[in-house]
Image (spheres, helix red, strand yellow):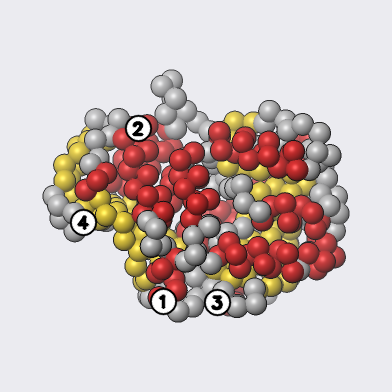
Amino acid sequence: MPTQQGLTLVDKDDSGVDTAFRRDVLAGLAQPQKAIPARWLYDDAGSRLFEEITQVPEYYPTRAETEILSAKAGEFARRIGPGRAVVEFGSGSSVKTPLLLSAVDPAAYVPLDISGDFLRAAAERLSAQFPDLPVYPVEADFMRQVELPAEVSALPKLGFFPGSTIGNMVPRTAVDLLRAMRATLGSNSLLLIGMDLIKDIAVLEAAYDDAAGVTAAFNRNLARRINSELGGTIPVERLQHEARWNDEFARIEMHLVAREPLEFTVADQPFAMARGETIHTENSHKFSRRSANALLLAGGWTPVARWTDSGELFSLILAEASVPRNAP
């Protein structure tokens, strides 16, 4: 079955600029600690660079998650069952999605992504791999409730959120996202979500600062995107990539560090950075079993199963939509 044309649910102005992107960048650069939400790293170029990151030796999450999906296919099939619409939040082109689809025998696949061209290309490739599976790509910001295609409205849903992308968000935002996912998927839905685990700091820092410099290019691409889409004049070559462990918040942080004093404009607004000042571009929170469960419960999901890889580096958690209750 051919891939459907899909839906586009991203707000753009008359010049084609994503209004949410402009709003977040201008607000973030005006803060004392400059910061831009990590989802804006994933334009088409950023998405391609991230796929390269998943192949570098230092980046273990993709290999660990793939191991779980391969080794536990029978358990996924038993617990999830056939006939669901698999809704993937932030779809990618890796090997993980076909492994899940092969295990659970879905009725439809709905990839959601904010990067439209990358989304449609990935959906076409997957549709060719599963010719009998209806595929309905939706270009949307899944941080809020998304209206799914009418063709899947009556089907039970399985949300798929691999890669520990939930760790990119501060807890408040992560809870908001989990609640938006529950609203998108509806009652009686399931969620299969990846969460990275706390481990040796040297392993963590290397995973986000690989020797080949792919992660550095991925980080600096955000500045290039700002220049391209928002008429920015950021001197990209004067920004240095840095990954650091923040033990207080159990997270790796990515920053763009000014090598020297900088002045630039974005959307005709002036900004300046002192030498050593940073733009905070990404968090990657790491979880214990307890902190992962607490986050899911706060977001309206009840954990029902958990799997880890053989090295216990990474976890996949299956949760069901919680029934609202007002008392213990």
For the residues bearing labels 2 and 3, Cβ distance under 8 angstroms: no
Tell me whether the residue at label 1 lies in contact with that at label 2, contact meaning CB atoms closer than 8 angstroms.
no
Q: CA distance from mark 1 to mark 3?
A: 15 Å
Spatial CA span between label 2 and label 4 = 23 Å
Residue 282 is situated, as x and y percent measured from the top left of the image, at 40, 56
Which residue is at a point 58% across and 42% down the rendered structure image?
A: 113
Q: Earlier in the sequence, mark 1 or mark 3?
A: 1
State the quadrant of the C terminus: bottom right
Question: Badges 1 and 3: C-beta atoms under 8 Å apart?
Answer: no
Q: Amino acid at mark 1?
A: Ile
The residue labelled by disc 2 is 228
Q: Nearer the viewer, mark 1 or mark 3?
A: 1
Q: Alpha-carbon distance for marks 3 and 4? A: 32 Å
Question: In this rendering, would 218 be left or right of 102?
Answer: left
In the rendered structure, the answer to whether residue 242 lies left or right of residue 82 reads left
Question: Residue, x 31% and y 35% (percent of image)?
Answer: 227
Mark 2 element type: helix
The location of residue 72, given as percent across then percent down, is 76, 68
**The one of 154 and 196 positioned closer to us in this rendering:** 196
The residue that disc 1 covers is 201
Under mark 4, the amino acid is Glu
**Furthest residue toward top:** 14
Residue type (three-letter) at the residue carrying disc 2: Ser
Q: Between residues 298 and 31, which one lies in front from this camera angle?
A: 31
Kindly state the secondary structure of the residue where label 4 is placed: loop
Q: Which residue is mark 4?
A: 277
First of labels 2, 3 by sequence position: 2
